[in-house]
Amino acid sequence: MSSVRALIDGLVASIREGDGQAPREQRCAAFANAGLTGPVRTLVDKVASRARDVHDEDIAAARASGSSEDQIFELVVCAAVGQAMRQYASARAALDATTRSE
Amino acid sequence: MRLAILDTGHAFWSKLLFAFIRTVSRQPTPEALKLVAYRPEFYGSRMKAVTHEAMRGTSAWSVGDRELMAAFVSSANESEYCTKAHTAVSARAYKDAGKVSAALSDLDAAPLAEPLRATLRMLRKLTRENTVDVEDMRAVLAAGASREQVEDALAVAFAFNATNRLADALGFSVPGPKAFEVGAKFLLARGYR
C-alpha cells in the first residue's frame, strides 16, 4: 500500500483547503485543535480528545452560536482527521528514528 | 445521527442507492455509508480511497489481520459501532471468531503470531496516548514485523482513529448483530470503495 501516504495527503488537503462552507481558517484551526473559541472550540476539542463524550448539547451549542449543520460537519471531520494525523505523524517519526539511531 | 443532513441531506442518487441497499439487505442503511456518501467531494470519496488502500491494498498483513487491527483500535477508543463492525469482518475473514475475541479481551494470552501481537500493542498505545516513541517501534521490529508492515499498520490506525471519532461524535446508532454480519459480508466482497 505504498500509495496510501499520497491518498492521506490528498484527504487532508481537501478538508483543510478545498471548497467548503466553513471558512478555511476555521477548518485549519479545527484540524489543529487550536485557535478556536466558544462552543465550536469545546466541540472540536471533544472530537479530538474524547469523542465518546460528545453529546447532543455540544452540537446544539455550536448551532446556537451560528454554525450551520454543514459547517459543523466540516469542522468535526477536520477535528477527527487532524487528531488521527498527529498520531500518524508521531508514529512515523518514531519509526524513522529507529534507523537514525542504530 | 446528530446532524439531520447526514440522515436526509444526500443527493438523489445516494438516496436511490440507500433504498436499494435497504431492500436487498433488509437492514437499515449503514451509518458509516451515510457519512461517506454526504458531500463526498469534501471528505467521503477520499476517505474511502484511503481506507480501501489501507484495508485491501497490497500488504504482508492478511485482510483478517488488518480488520483485527481496525477492531482493536476501535476497542481502544471505546467506539462501540466500529468495534462491532470490524470484529465481525475480522472474524469472517479469519473464519475464527474465537481468535478475534481472544485478541480483544486479552492480547498477551491470545493465540496470535508475535509480529501481530507486538503491532497491536503499539497501536493500542498510539491510540490511547496519541504518541509512541522509538523504543515502542524497536519492540515491534524486534518481534519480527518488517518496516513495511509497521507502515501498513499505521495507515490502518490512521483510518480508524479518524472514523471512530466521527462515529462517536456524530452519534452513529448501533444496530443489532445481524446488520453487522450483513455488513461484514459486503465489506469482504467489495471492500471500502
Image: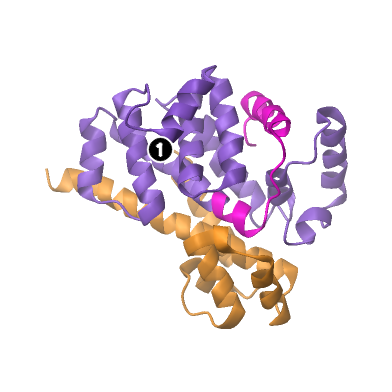
Q: Residue furthest top?
A: B95
The magenta segment is B164-193
Give the main secondary structure, helix, strand or loop, of the magenta stretch.
helix
Task: From the top left corner, tell me how far across and down residue A70 is, in percent.
Answer: 72, 67
> Residue B108 location, x and y as percent?
32, 31
Q: Is residue A50 left or right of residue A59?
A: left
The residue that mark 1 highlights is B153
* Residue B66, image x, y percentages: 47, 31
The residue depicted at 55 percent of the width and 21 percent of the height is B93
Kindly identify which chain the residue marked by label 1 belongs to.
Answer: B
Q: Residue at x 46, y 75 (%)?
A: A34
Please say whether residue B166 is one of the residues in the magenta stretch.
yes
Write the residue at 51% across / 69% down: A45
Image quadrant where one finds the C terminus of chain B: top right
Quadrant of the rendered image containing residue B5 = bottom right
Q: Colour of chain A?
A: orange
Q: Colour of chain B?
A: purple
Under mark 1, the amino acid is Ala
At numbered mark 1, what does the secondary structure look like: helix, strand or loop? helix
Tally of marks: 1
